[in-house]
């Protein structure tokens, strides 16, 4: 050990040594590239000293699209391996590398991460990857109790470059260190969770995997399995564990190494469905009204669940309107302003239901309840195509989401061509063969068609914006049958930078301009402002006749993002929402999302997803689904298709919830409803489960005649008002005094 420290002092390295662990942060360094630099016998005494935990550009070396080599001399004591759990492998854990690396031990390549420019398949960065390179002791590469040379070749594409983050550590891992577990919760038909056990080290570890499924409400074990396994490198083992998706379950997986008794254990909350299944008989799930401007086409699909075929009829249907018998799509035009009330009946083999419905016709009558539908951004981002929009629209109908009021199908960024047509009109790219045909196809099904642009020269995704072409673009939208425009500030920041006076008027101007042209079109176009809440858009949004305005930056599928946007940044905005004009805390992040052509399950836990939908419906937010509907599972359908929950969002009083109480990690948000009731969300935003006496928490609950659990669609007894709210979870109540 003494010798090791002396060596470290001699060559100017800092070394930390413990029994099975050696750490080094300093190395010798040379810019450039030469295969001879991997050789242990090379004399590197003239190389400079460098810190491997900080990028090389921070230490005076600017190397872009080029190479640098690090060399570390290290004496490895044979005592490291003696007495360890296993004597087969030693792991060389490298610092992270901007952008790719190759690692040589005593002249032999022991690991590589990312691809160098000359490699097959071309360069690929792997700057954020953890580098653990196992070396088999049997291979004899390690020189015990002698000088070892670790040479690391690094390629950097662009600043920052070189090794960074953690020191180089040489470790003798214990028997289970290379094991990892991965869970995939498949929530279709028979729900099951696939548990994958992998071993990243060339060690055979034999042991037992115990999987327990416990009911989180009762604490009782209700399922699971036990199996003896030997996970090997490169051969992950997959086990499928069925569970009851109607129960709130926790899966706990524990692997115990037979030899040492060491364990790895992980908990995974499973998806659960609280929404009761819809009855087979017809049920109207939408608000009892819809608004349209005089002479604009009416497009309204009655949201009715129940078995198909179904027959729709109307009593006293106003002149100028037709109702399609087979799918309940209302169409036509009304010339004069006024309220037209009529009764619609839906009938199928299992029964019959009716709704008294009012069509409100007037200049300011659109968006009387928040828009419900889909937007392509959170799933496909710039890889959106006409085919993907149609597939999601078809799934919206087939999976029954249209029966709950979801109707807008909105294309976000990525549809525009690189250049405008010679006459200045906007052109679409090859992924959209025909906007007009797509619009017609959607309208035939009673769905609505949305599009995206920017008041600037370019959109956020770098596509063409509408600047200087606002009138032409509004006319194109009309000719395609557009019903919704999301108008995203983004590229307008360049025009705005040139404004001398950057007061509120400079923020209003581009939005007012487009609104004038939209209003000239002979159809209703929902106007959605997207400028992230600048210049308190909620204060002036109604005056540019906006139907909604984003209040924050972009959401992503993490608790941090959802908490910040939904809880922190919406408090206090309630007074600005009203029928026709809504605060928009951004689109939904449930289901398969990914902002690319690679989709994955939302990273929100099931409890967080219940919180998300509860809060967004309370906030009278736009309800725009952000996932691929074709791949939507039963859990997500349950989240989005609870008519009692959705009817809070669609409540015709149009009052947004505000935070009425914050007690430690418990927040209460409440909104008054048109029928005199109050919708109340009780949220646990903390990291621990909490016992909550809901009656004691909020006086309206104590005073209430009825307390309804909206997710479970049942009234609660006094005894049920004391409950545990899981971390990041909630309870959603409607109380009637
Ligand atoms: C901005 C918006 C997003 C999305 C992208 C498209 O980031 O806030 O919602 O529309 O632009 O490029």
Image: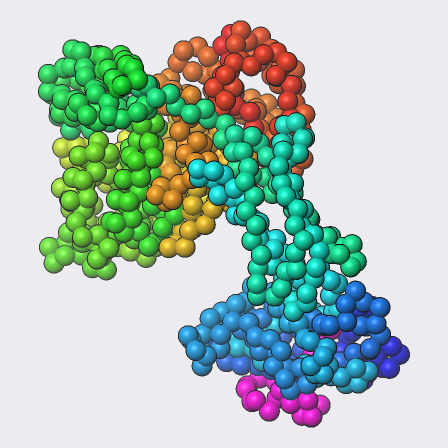
Query: In the drawing, does residue 259 fall left or right of residue 683?
Result: right
> Residue placed at 29% from the left, 48% from the top?
388
Colour style of the rendered protein structure:
rainbow
Single out the residue that lies furthest toward the right.
2
Q: Is residue 463 above or below residue 333?
A: below
Q: Is residue 126 visible?
A: yes
Q: Position of residue 582 (x, y in %)?
A: 37, 29
Quadrant of residue 607 within the rendered picture? top right
Q: What stretch of residues is rendered in magenta?
A: 22-46
Q: Position of residue 501 (x, y in %)?
A: 36, 45
Q: Residue 301 in magenta?
A: no
Quadrant of residue 336 within the rendered picture? top left
Q: Quadrant of the N terminus?
A: bottom right
> Residue placed at 73% from the left, 52% from the top?
256
Number of marks present in the image shown: 0
Q: Position of residue 267 (x, y in %)?
A: 64, 43
Query: In the drawing, does residue 105 fall left or right of residue 422?
Result: right
Q: Residue 41 in magenta?
A: yes
> Residue placed at 77% from the left, 74% from the top?
14
Q: Is residue 724 above or below residue 568?
A: above
> Residue placed at 62% from the left, 78% from the top?
110
Q: Is residue 499 visible?
A: no
Q: Position of residue 170 (x, y in %)?
A: 73, 72
Query: In the drawing, does residue 404 fall left or right of residue 430?
Result: right
Q: Is residue 572 above or below residue 487?
A: above
Query: In the drawing, does residue 595 fall left or right of residue 349?
Result: right
């Amino acid at each position: 050990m003494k010798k090791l420290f002396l060596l470290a002092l001699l060559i100017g390295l800092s070394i930390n040594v413990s029994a099975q662990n050696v750490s080094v942060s300093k190395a010798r360094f040379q810019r450039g590239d030469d295969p001879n630099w991997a050789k242990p016998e090379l004399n590197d005494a003239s190389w400079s000293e460098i810190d491997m935990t900080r990028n090389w550009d921070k230490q005076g070396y600017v190397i872009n699209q080029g190479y640098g080599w690090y060399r570390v001399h290290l004496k490895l004591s044979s005592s490291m391996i003696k007495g360890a759990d296993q004597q087969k492998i030693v792991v060389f854990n490298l610092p992270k590398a901007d952008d790719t690396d190759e690692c040589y031990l005593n002249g032999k390549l022991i690991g590589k991460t990312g691809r160098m420019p000359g490699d097959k398949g071309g360069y690929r960065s792997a700057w954020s990857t953890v580098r653990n390179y196992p070396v088999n002791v049997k291979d004899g590469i390690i020189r015990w109790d002698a000088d070892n040379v670790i040479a690391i070749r690094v390629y950097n594409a662009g600043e920052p470059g070189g090794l960074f983050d953690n020191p180089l550590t040489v470790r003798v891992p214990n028997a289970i260190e290379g094991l990892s577990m991965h869970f995939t919760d498949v929530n279709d038909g028979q729900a099951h969770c696939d548990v994958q056990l992998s071993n990243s080290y060339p060690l055979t570890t034999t042991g037992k995997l115990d999987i327990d499924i416990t009911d989180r409400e009762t604490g009782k074990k209700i399922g699971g399995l036990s199996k003896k396994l030997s996970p090997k490198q490169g051969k992950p083992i997959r086990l499928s564990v069925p569970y009851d998706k109607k129960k709130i379950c926790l899966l706990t997986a524990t692997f115990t190494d037979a030899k040492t008794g060491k364990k790895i254990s992980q908990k995974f909350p499973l998806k659960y469905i609280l929404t009761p299944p819809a009855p087979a008989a017809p049920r109207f799930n939408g608000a009892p009204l819809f608004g349209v401007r005089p002479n604009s086409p009416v497009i309204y699909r009655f949201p009715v669940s129940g078995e198909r075929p179904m027959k729709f009829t109307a009593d006293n249907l106003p002149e100028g309107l037709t109702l399609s018998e087979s799918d309940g799509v209302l169409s036509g035009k009304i010339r004069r302003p006024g309220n037209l009330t009529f009764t619609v009946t839906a009938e199928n083999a299992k029964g019959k239901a009716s709704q008294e419905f009012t069509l409100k016709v007037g200049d300011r009558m659109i968006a009387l309840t928040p828009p419900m539908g889909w937007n392509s951004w959170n799933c496909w981002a710039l890889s959106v195509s006409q085919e993907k929009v149609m597939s999601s629209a078809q799934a919206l109908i087939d999976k029954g989401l249209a029966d709950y009021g979801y109707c807008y199908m909105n294309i976000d960024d990525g549809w525009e061509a690189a250049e405008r047509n010679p006459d200045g009109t906007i052109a679409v790219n090859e992924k959209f063969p025909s906007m007009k045909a797509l619009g017609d196809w959607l309208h035939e099904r009673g769905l609505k068609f949305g599009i995206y642009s920017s008041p600037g020269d370019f959109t956020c995704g770098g596509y063409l914006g509408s600047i200087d072409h606002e009138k032409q673009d509004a006319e194109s939208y009309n000719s395609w049958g557009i019903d919704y425009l999301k108008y995203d500030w983004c590229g307008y920041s360049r025009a705005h930078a040139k404004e001398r006076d950057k007061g509120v008027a400079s923020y209003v101007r581009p939005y007012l301009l487009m609104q004038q042209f939209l209003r000239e079109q002979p159809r209703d176009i929902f106007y959605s402002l997207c400028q992230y809440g600048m210049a308190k858009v909620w204060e002036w949004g109604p005056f540019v006749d906006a139907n909604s305005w984003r209040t924050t930056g972009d959401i992503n599928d993490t608790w941090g993002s959802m908490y910040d946007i939904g809880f922190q940044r919406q408090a206090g905005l309630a007074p600005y929402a009203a029928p026709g004009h809504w605060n928009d805390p951004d689109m939904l992040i449930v289901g398969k999302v990914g902002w690319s052509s690679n989709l994955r399950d939302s990273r929100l836990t099931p409890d967080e997803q219940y919180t998300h939908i509860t809060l967004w419906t309370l906030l009278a937010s736009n309800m725009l689904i952000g996932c691929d509907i074709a791949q939507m599972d039963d859990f997500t359908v349950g989240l989005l298709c609870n008519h009692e929950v959705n009817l809070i969002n669609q409540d015709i009083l149009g009052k947004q919830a505000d935070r009425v109480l914050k007690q430690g990690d418990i927040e209460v948000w409440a909104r008054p409803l048109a029928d005199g009731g109050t919708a109340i969300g009780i949220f646990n935003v903390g990291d621990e489960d909490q016992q909550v006496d809901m009656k004691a928490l909020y006086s309206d609950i104590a005073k209430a005649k009825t307390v309804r659990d909206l997710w479970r669609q049942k009234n609660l007894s006094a005894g049920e008002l004391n409950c545990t709210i899981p971390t990041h979870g909630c309870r959603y109540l409607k109380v009637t005094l």
